[in-house]
């Protein structure tokens, strides 16, 4: 969970080039030409000429250094003759295509290999701390979740398949060597092919296997279709409304995650693209089950974790309905979880926390709130048969997932 949002200050692209063409990096005119061409390519307005000076008191660092001011900040570079490596930094307050910059730079200096890092710097973050670090091929995604607390999760990526900015968020899809394909939103891991089943199954199956009749379901968020795929494994579900604010998430999921796509072909699924809070509007007594599969509680997702939202969800549920909501990490977000469970308890008589194991999320776990008007998740366990096999959920998991460690029991209050 990312706690604060800061306005963007600028984009820094650092490119380390290894084994460059020795002639190019020793040629002042060529380095000047590089700066000029890069500025043209990225539409940077240059201020003054490119400064290139020879530097270095020892053989190890000896070579040219370059600086070029631009209207929105500067480019700099250091070219080390001893290794034929080069270290380029491009910083601009305006937006630019860092991928284009990296590809052009690698090509220009004919580097044998390169490592790049892109950093979105933000106003107001404490010194040296970037709020969001993201994603460049052959590099790592370091989640912004927890950066302020001094922790992050790193996943190596091998290829960028998509990077799109919607009116709401920046959505990326990567190939990764360890976890298959992965989607991130604003630098935060949403799911990977490796372990998505654990999250998606656990959002859907426990509640469906408690309430005897589940015919009409609403998913808020979840535009990727993962939870929808699980809900639709039950023949008794007659209608599923799916409301995600961002249609780009659905488009990219359909394109890159074929195992989710089947859900969108199911005639029972009705897709809406709007704010989930607004979608609930004045709905009364309509759904058997509401599942909130949203991004972390920041920005426009915040409204889905507020008291007003739980009140509306309570009203939109039938008299024996169940609400399940994404509820962060039992290790990292205890205060948030306690506060939110208390808010839910203002409306629902039965409220429990349960969790699942998922290696690609921070702390390797993610939890859920189970809020019910009538049924107890354990006493009313009522197993049903899904139409397709599951990978995570079973009877044993159903019982075990509601058992909390001592530290969480104390923090979250009432257990089953
Ligand atoms: N499993 C994920 C996680 O917690 O990392 C969540 C996956 S899903 C992609 C989250 C979705 O919630 C996104 O597609 C986002 O557009 C949607 N979302 C966030 N706030 C929303 C809101 N207020 N109304 C509807 N959808 C929302």
Image: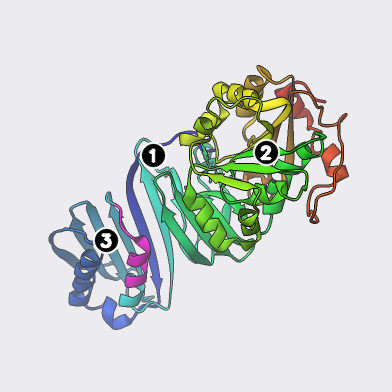
> In front here: 130 or 319?
319
Q: CA distance from mark 2 to mark 3?
A: 55 Å
Task: Please tell me the numbered disc located at residue 127.
Answer: 1
Q: CA distance from mark 2 to mark 1?
A: 46 Å
> In front here: 36 or 317?
317
Residue 365 in which image quadrant: top right
Residue 61 visible within the image: yes
Residue 22 in which image quadrant: bottom left
Q: Is residue 401 left or right of residue 35?
A: right
Crowd rating for badge 3 (residues with CA inside 10 Å; few <14, some 14–19, many 20+): some
Q: Main secondary structure of the magenta part?
A: helix
Disc 2: residue Cβ within 8 A of ligand 1's nearest atom: no
Instruction: Say if mark 2 contacts mark 1, CB within 8 Å.
Output: no
> In front here: 230 or 413?
230
Instruction: Indicate which disc, 2 or 3, sits on the residue closer to the N terminus.
Output: 3
Measured as percent of width and height from the top left, residue 76 is found at 27, 61
Q: Quadrant of the C terminus?
A: top right
Front position among marks 2 and 3: 2
Task: Give the residue pinned by disc 2.
Answer: 217
Q: Residue shown at 87%/37% (left/top)?
A: 382
Residue 246's place in the image compared with 262, above or below, is: above
Residue 16 in which image quadrant: bottom left
Residue 140's place in the image compared with 347, above or below, is: below
Q: CA distance from mark 3 to mark 1?
A: 21 Å
As helix, strand or loop, the secondary structure at mark 1 comes to loop
Which residues are drawn in magenta?
95-104
Q: Quadrant of ligand 1?
A: top right
Task: Please tell me the numbered disc located at residue 163.
Answer: none
């Amino acid at each position: 969970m990312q706690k604060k949002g800061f306005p963007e200050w600028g984009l820094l692209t650092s490119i380390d080039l290894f084994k460059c063409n020795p002639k190019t990096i020793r040629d002042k005119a060529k380095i000047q030409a590089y700066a000029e061409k890069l500025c043209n390519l990225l539409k940077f307005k240059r201020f003054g000429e490119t400064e290139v000076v020879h530097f270095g008191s020892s053989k190890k660092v000896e070579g040219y250094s370059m600086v070029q001011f631009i209207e929105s900040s500067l480019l700099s570079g250091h070219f080390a003759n001893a290794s034929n490596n080069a270290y380029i930094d491009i910083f601009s307050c305006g937006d630019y295509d860092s991928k284009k910059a990296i590809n052009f730079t690698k090509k220009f200096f004919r580097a044998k290999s390169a490592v790049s890092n892109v950093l979105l710097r933000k106003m107001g973050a404490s010194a040296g701390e970037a709020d969001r670090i993201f994603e460049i091929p052959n590099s790592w995604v370091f989640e912004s979740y927890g950066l302020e607390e001094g922790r992050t999760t790193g996943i190596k990526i091998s290829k960028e398949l998509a990077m799109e900015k919607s009116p709401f968020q920046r959505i990326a899809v990567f190939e990764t060597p360890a976890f298959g394909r992965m989607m991130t939103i604003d630098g935060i891991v949403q799911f990977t092919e490796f372990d998505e089943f654990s999250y998606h199954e656990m959002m859907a199956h426990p509640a469906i296997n408690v309430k005897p009749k589940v015919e009409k379901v609403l998913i808020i968020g979840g535009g990727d279709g993962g939870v929808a795929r699980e809900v639709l494994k039950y023949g008794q579900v007659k209608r599923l409304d799916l409301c995600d604010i961002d249609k780009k998430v659905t488009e990219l999921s359909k394109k890159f995650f074929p195992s989710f796509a089947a859900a969108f072909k199911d005639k029972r699924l009705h897709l809406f693209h709007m704010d989930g809070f607004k979608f609930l509007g004045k709905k009364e007594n309509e759904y058997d089950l509401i599942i909130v599969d949203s991004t972390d509680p920041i920005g426009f997702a915040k409204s889905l974790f507020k008291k007003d939202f739980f009140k509306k969800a309570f009203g939109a549920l039938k008299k024996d309905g169940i609400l399940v909501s994404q509820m962060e990490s039992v290790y990292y977000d205890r205060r948030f979880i306690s506060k939110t469970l208390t808010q839910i308890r203002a409306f629902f008589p039965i409220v429990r926390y349960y969790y699942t194991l998922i290696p690609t999320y921070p702390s390797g776990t993610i939890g859920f709130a189970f809020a019910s008007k009538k049924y107890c998740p354990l006493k009313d366990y009522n197993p049903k048969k899904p139409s397709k096999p599951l990978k995570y959920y079973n009877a044993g998991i159903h019982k075990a997932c509601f058992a909390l460690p001592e530290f969480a029991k104390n923090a979250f209050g009432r257990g089953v």
